[in-house]
Each structure stands twice: as C-alpha cells, then as structure tokens.
Image: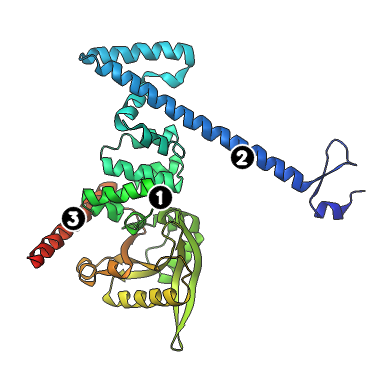
C-alpha cells in the first residue's frame, strides 16, 4: 500500500520498483541542472552563430567591395551560396548570405555586436538591420536587449511603432544618442525611454461606452499584455491604493514599480481630456509616496496620466515633466496604420519645434 504521508512530503515513487522512493527535491535539483545546462548550450550556440554570420558577412563584403564590378558581386554571392549549400545545408542560401553582408555593413563595429549577441538571436538581428534610421535601429536593439524580447515581441513592437511613441524620438538626435549610449554602456533607463505616447490598449476589448472603473478592471484582467505595452521592467503593486491626508481618503488607480528606474510609478486613468487639475491630484499622490512609501536608494516616485485626449498647450505650460509627471493618450481601438503614423510624425514634429523654440528663448534671455 502507498504511504500517503511520504508522497505529501515530496517523495516520488520510482516507476520501475514501487518499493523504492526518490526524494522530490533531488529530482527537482537535477531537473534544474539539466534545464540550466540546456539553456546555456542554446545561448552559447546562438552567440557562436551570430559571430559566424557577422564574420562571413564581413569577409564577403571585403571581397565584393574589393572589385568595382557590381555584376561580380552578384555572381560571387550566388556561386558561394551554391557551394556552401552543398557542403553545409540551407542556412547558407543566397538570401541568407545577403542578410549576413547587410549585417556586417550595418554593424561594422564588432564590439557592438559582441554586446548585443548575448541576448539577441540571429532572427532578432534580421529584423533590426533593415531599419534605416540609425537611432531607431539602436533603440530597438538596446531595448530588446534590456527587456529580453522574443522575436515575436520585437516584430510587434516595430509594427506598433514603439520608437515613434517614446519621448526619445522627439528629442534632438544628439541628446537621443547620449541616452542610448547610457543605456548601452550602463543599462541606465530614463523616463524618455520608458514612457510612451500614445499607449495602445486595443487588446482590452472595451465597448463603445465604458467607465474609468471598467478601464481599470479591463487592464487588470489583461495585466500581462498591459505590462508588455508598458515595458517589462514594470511590476504591478496595487489597485485603488488608499492614502489618507488630513483625514481625507484618496485612492491611487494603479501603482507600479519600475526596476530599471528604481522608483514607484503611479498611473491615473482619465476618460476625457487632460485637465490642469489632474496635475495637482498627481502631485499630491507623488509627494505622499515620497514621504511615506519611498525606500532608501529609490528614486523620486513618478506619475503617468493616461487620458483619452491630450491638451498640448496645457502640457507645455504646466511643465509637467519637471514634477516627474508624464501625460499620454491611450487608444482602445487602433486606427489604420497610416493614420497612426501620420499622427505620431506630427507629434514628433511639434515636440522638436517646441524644444527648438525653448532653446532660442533661453539664448535670448542669456544675452
């Protein structure tokens, strides 16, 4: 007869001999060793593969560029592919060799490739190397590395125009480059890399009319997808967190912690247009969290107000980012991609104009 008490303590019956019991912890430890080793083999194989493809691309590039005839380049790649495919299989098709050449052309610095290949697979690189804008390409490569996206997630983020929805795309190229270099060298996330505008919440499946509570509840039901849209460094902490100030109770809609920025993040949901009063409410929450909840070593709490519509002049005049507050629109239904693209490019243009205007104003004041 089976000893139930032994099973409840993690004892597993050996299928070969029912009288022999194996400690469940022993099996779990061995499973962990096997899985970690398998994972290590996979990572090592990926690293070697990426290095091989970069070196092949570089070598072909040197040979092809060494001859000025364009036709020679086409012929040599085609002939090389046929020979390598016979010897090593389909991984060396003409199309894949051209990916390798483009890879080496896009990333001539081997050190950058070495830093990225620990987290990015060859499939990741094939998506990234065909992004023409260098800043945009580096943004996706570095965020993908830090947040450890799958290739499917990377593709979805590119299709969802994540770069155009972050504040870094609206900054002058030199400042944007500095932030990306800090991310590459120090893994330092900044608010301009973290916060988006707008947020795409079409996956919530909300009806035409809904309340703030409906929006909040839908987010919690789809929390995993909401976190993917926010960024993987966000960790959910509380819903409707009660705080008491002078005997008055207030309720924070959603409270998160961001590991990269090491700070609490308040998210407030607004159905309508952003109002100036929303700033005062958020500042109150942030000051309370700073006084009572912030731990040693953490940064100042930050706020994100998600609203159905931004008030651009209000946002500019209130200088919200000086208070650690960010405003963003959310979309519960995705518009056609060309409409979204036009909207984002218009927002980028407006933001850059505002930055340029403020710079001119400061120069004039300094005279």
Q: Which residue is mark 3?
A: 352
Nearer to us: label 2 or label 1 = 1
Please provide percent x and percent y for residue 63.
29, 16
In the figure, 29 relative to 261: above or below? above
Left or right side of 241 for 159: left
Q: CA distance from mark 3 to mark 1?
A: 26 Å
Q: Position of residue 264 (x, y in %)?
A: 44, 66
**For marks 2 and 3 on the same chain, the one whose residue lies earlier in the sequence:** 2
Name the mark on residue 187.
1
Q: Compared to 158, does 55 lie above or below?
A: above
- Count the numbered circles shown: 3
Of badges 2 and 3, nearer the viewer stands: 2
Callout 3: 10 Å neighbours few (<14), some, many (20+)?
some
What quarter of the picture does the C terminus occupy?
A: bottom left
Indicate the position of residue 128 as horizontal and vertical percent values.
Answer: 35, 37
Residue marked by disc 2: 36
Q: Residue at x 26, y 65 (%)?
A: 310
Residue situated in front as seen by the camera: 367 or 173: 367
């Amino acid at each position: 007869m089976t000893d139930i008490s032994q099973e409840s303590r993690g004892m597993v019956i050996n299928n070969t001999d029912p009288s022999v019991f194996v400690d469940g912890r022993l099996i779990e430890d061995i499973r962990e060793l096997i899985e970690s080793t398998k994972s290590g083999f996979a990572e090592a194989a990926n690293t070697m593969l990426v290095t091989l493809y970069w070196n092949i691309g570089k070598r072909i590039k040197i040979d092809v560029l060494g001859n000025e005839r364009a036709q020679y380049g086409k012929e040599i790649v085609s002939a090389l592919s046929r020979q390598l495919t016979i010897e090593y299989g389909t991984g060396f098709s003409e199309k894949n060799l051209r990916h390798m050449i483009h890879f080496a052309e896009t990333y001539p610095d081997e050190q950058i490739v070495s830093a990225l290949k620990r987290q990015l697979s060859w499939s990741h690189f094939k998506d990234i190397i065909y992004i023409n804008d260098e800043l945009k390409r580096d943004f996706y490569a570095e965020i993908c590395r830090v947040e450890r996206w799958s290739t499917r997630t990377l593709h979805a983020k590119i299709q969802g125009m994540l770069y155009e929805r972050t504040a870094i795309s609206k900054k002058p190229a030199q400042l944007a480059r500095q932030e990306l270099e800090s991310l590459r060298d120090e893994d330092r996330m900044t608010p301009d890399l973290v916060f988006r505008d707008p947020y795409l919440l079409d996956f919530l499946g909300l009806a035409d009319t809904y309340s703030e509570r409906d929006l909040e509840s839908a987010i919690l039901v789809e929390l995993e997808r909401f976190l993917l849209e926010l960024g993987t460094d966000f960790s959910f902490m509380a819903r409707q967190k009660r705080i008491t100030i002078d005997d008055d109770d207030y309720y924070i809609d959603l409270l998160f912690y961001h590991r990269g920025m090491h700070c609490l993040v308040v998210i407030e949901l607004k159905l309508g247009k952003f109002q100036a009063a929303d700033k005062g409410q958020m500042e109150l929450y942030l000051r309370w969290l700073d006084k009572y909840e912030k731990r040693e070593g953490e940064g100042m709490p930050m706020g994100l107000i998600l609203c159905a519509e931004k008030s651009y002049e209000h946002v500019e005049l209130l200088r919200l980012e000086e208070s650690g507050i960010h405003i963003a629109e959310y979309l519960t239904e995705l518009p056609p991609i060309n409409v979204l693209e036009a909207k984002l490019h218009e927002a980028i243009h407006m933001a850059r104009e505002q930055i340029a205007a403020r710079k001119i104003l400061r120069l004039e004041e300094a005279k």
